[in-house]
Image (cartoon, rainbow, N blue to C red):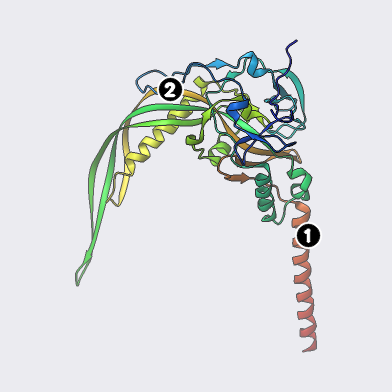
Amino acid sequence: MAQTQDFKCPRCGGKLEFDAATQKMLCPYCDSTFDPADVGMEKPDTPPKKADADAKWDHDGKQLDAQETENLQAYVCRSCGGEIISDENTAATSCPFCGNPVVLSGRVSGMLRPDVVIPFKTTKKQAIAKMKEFVKSKRFIPRLFADENHLKEIKGVYVPFWLFDSAVSADVWYDATTVRHWSDNSYNYTETSYYDVFRTGSMRFAQIPVDGSKKMPDDLMDSLEPFFLDDAVDFNTAYLSGFFADKYDVPMEESMPRANERTKNSAKEALRKSVTGYATVIPKREEIEIRPGKAQYALLPVWLLNTQYRGETYTFAMNGQTGRFIGNLPVSGGRLAGLFAGVAAAVSAVTFAAGLLIGLF
């Protein structure tokens, strides 16, 4: 049976974890730090191809080899069925996607090798502080959401994304108007002029992101954007140490329509911004051609906490690169009722006092 491979400290033998604050592999026992490239797995021999806008969607998918998967485990959630990847020493107490307990299912097999990864730039401490600040700003929430131990359950998850390159040729026709107002001693005048406006353009788009996880709602991930791909580095399993990684369950082919839609909208927006000086501008016809190019498989960092409350799931999420934060919270019926009770009591007291005054006069 193959032995598991840890990322061990060369100085003291302790287990190394990736530290978002320093972007280094950190040993918590002797405080030594190392570059991830010096302790991680070997990089693939074949460099990624450059984008080719005239080709079909293309992705040179490779699976993680046996050496890379030896120190990884797969956890399967009993509730949502999510498959989560982590190192074998990461505590898996609950699913980061639905909040339910997860169980160890076994070794990773057949996992597609990501092309690039954006390492975590924000720390767990920063994520917890951000959640505390958010919760503190909300007055009528259940006490569960302000519990210190509960907030510490936040988990760092690498979310799978497909990144699409493409070239676009776009022609758009608009109906536009200008309006002129003037007056004399007798009348006010309004003159409306009508125009046919045409715009055409060719543009290239690089790394249009589409999340590859069914468990992560598209609107949630859209709200966490942007992710800055300048920070992306070649994938190395060392970056997963101390974190979870979601295994994609939306294939590249199924992600293409959403990538095309995002590309079309961006192209139309770019042309629309060039139409200026009119009172109204209404698109009436468009012809947009997308020539697909290179696709990449990427892991992007997200701090995540899901909580079940009265049958509903509530999500906190923070962009692990930029610190952008979103969250939804329930309203505590008891606390809200207490507020209304207090207001009602105050109103009754004022009414009673007014009645006494009226009685005196």
Circle 2 or circle 1, nearest the eye = 2
Name the residue that disc number 1 marks.
Answer: 338
Residue 204 position (above or below residue 50): below
Name the residue that disc number 2 marks.
Answer: 294
Q: Is residue 160 left or right of residue 261?
A: right
Residue at horizontal 56 percent and vertical 27 percent from the top: 212
Residue at horizontal 51 percent and vertical 35 percent from the top: 231
Q: Position of residue 319 (x, y in %)?
A: 58, 40
Residue 194 position (above or below residue 8): below
> Which residue is at the far front?
11
Q: Is residue 182 left or right of residue 244?
A: left
3D distance between C-alphas at marks 2 and 1: 58 Å
Q: Quadrant of the C terminus?
A: bottom right
Residue 86 position (above or below residue 21): above
Q: Report which quarter residue 301 is drawn in.
A: top right
Q: Is residue 279 left or right of residue 250?
A: left
Label pair 2/1, CB-CB below 8 angstroms: no
Amino acid marked by disc 1:
Gly
Q: Position of residue 91 (x, y in %)?
A: 76, 31
Q: Position of residue 213 (x, y in %)?
A: 59, 27
Within 10 Å of the Cα at label 2, are there few (<14), some (14-19), or many (20+) other Cα atoms?
many
Q: Report which quarter residue 251 is drawn in.
A: top right
Q: Report which quarter residue 288 is drawn in.
A: top left
Q: Position of residue 295 (x, y in %)?
A: 46, 23
Q: Which mark is residue 130?
A: none
Label 2: element kind: strand
Q: Toward the viewer: 47 or 62? A: 47
Q: Toward the viewer: 325 or 361? A: 325
Amino acid marked by disc 2:
Lys
Label 1: element kind: helix
| Numbered label tally | 2
Q: Is there any visible trace of residue 213 in the rendered image? A: no
